[in-house]
Each structure stands twice: as structure tokens, then as C-alpha cells.
Amino acid sequence: MKIEKIFEYDIIGQLRDKLQQLLVECFTDEYPKHRIYFKQLPHFRFVAIDDENQIVGQVGLDYRVMNLNGKPIRVLGIIDLCVSKINRSQGIGSLLLSEIDDFCEGKSVDFVLLFADNKKLYLNAGFKSVDNECTWLKIDDENQTTYGIGHEKMNELMVKEVGNIKWENGKIDLLGYLY
């Protein structure tokens, strides 16, 4: 098993097709059938490739500044982490999360942030559920248009402290779309 870091602008042709198949398989009806992102392109991805050169997992990553209680924080956001159905329960999701941890070492990243319905994998990897009021840019997935600003507490919000700043309860402005 190897993990490759691939910048989004390098994803073309057969690689794009394989990622599309994986994302549709993993996210079924909710994932757009004609693109390899849900709301917005990630900056780059870590892609898990097995010994037979097949893509078995992937995670998109988005780096941005957010506002936590009036203070800027640097956040690496996790987008669409998934593992093919036939390769689940083999530690590939944990391997991708470990790759993210390694990537963050020595970099200007305060937190890794994600939204998850199923939290078990992330709790085991050191993430914690937080209870912050969120503000974000609402995007219509189908038409790829902005339609407003969202404000809500999200039970799915999880963070991992990877820098020298402690996470605080309160308000988080994502300064962009919801992953």
C-alpha cells in the first residue's frame, strides 16, 4: 500500500475516472455523478493505492483561515475521506488520517477540521466532537451557486489540535463553504 499526494489540478483522464468511481461507490446517491468534488475542489488529496495499482481510498484536503471567536486560525479541512467497500476494515482510513498527521508536522496548521456522521474512526485518531455555533457559505450542490449564509450548531463538527492553539467553544466562521 502506498499513499500519494496529488494536487487537484493534476487529476485528469484515467485518474479522474477512478476517483469518480470510488466517490460514487462510497457516497452512493448523494454524490454528483459528473464531478470529483461535492461542493468545491479540494487543494490536494492523499490517495491510497494498493499493490495492484488500484485506488482503494482517498481524502481531499482544503487549507484556509477560519475565525474562531474573533481570532484567525489556520485549518486543514478533511473532505470526503472514503475507502472502497471491498477494502474497508483494513486500516486504510486510519492510514490516510495518519498521513494527514505527518503532513501537518512542522507546518502552519493549527487544527484539522471535519464534519462526520459516523465519528468512530475520527475519535480513534484523536479528533474530538465540539459544540460550536457555525457560520458558512451555502452552496447549491446541483447548480454550483451560492444561495446564502448558514448559521447553526453542527453535531457533526470534529477537530484535532495539531498546532499550539487550544480549541475554544463559541463561534466558528468557516469563511467559506461547509466541507
Image (tube, helix red, strand yellow):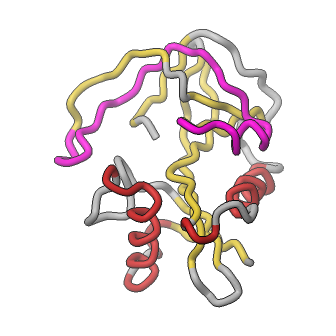
> Where 144 sits versus 157, above or below?
below
Determine the residue located farthest toward the top in the rendered image: 170
Residue at horizontal 78%, vertical 25%?
A: 165
In-image side of 102 versus 129 (left or right): right
Determine the residue located farthest toward the bottom in the rendered image: 52
Tell me if residue 126 is in the magenta stretch.
Answer: yes
Of the 4 image quadrants, the one containing the N terminus is bottom right
**Magenta region, residue range:** 117-145
Q: Position of residue 122 (x, y in %)?
A: 70, 41
Tell me if residue 48 is in the magenta stretch.
Answer: no
Residue at horizontal 41%, vertical 85%?
A: 14
Residue at horizontal 54%, vertical 40%?
A: 64
> Where 167 sits versus 90, above or below?
above
Question: Based on the displayed image, in which of its 4 quarters is residue 20 positioned?
Answer: bottom left
In-image side of 72 versus 106 (left or right): left
Q: Position of residue 43 (x, y in %)?
A: 50, 57
In-image side of 80 versus 162 (left or right): left
Residue at horizontal 47%, vertical 55%?
A: 42
Closest to the observer: 122 or 12? 122
How many numbered marks does the figure carry? Answer: 0
Q: Position of residue 148 (x, y in %)?
A: 24, 25
Question: Based on the displayed image, in which of its 4 quarters is residue 16 positioned?
Answer: bottom left
In-image side of 169 versus 139 (left or right): right
Q: Position of residue 132 (x, y in %)?
A: 57, 15
Question: Based on the displayed image, in which of its 4 quarters is residue 171 positioned?
Answer: top right
> Where 5 sits versus 99, above or below?
below
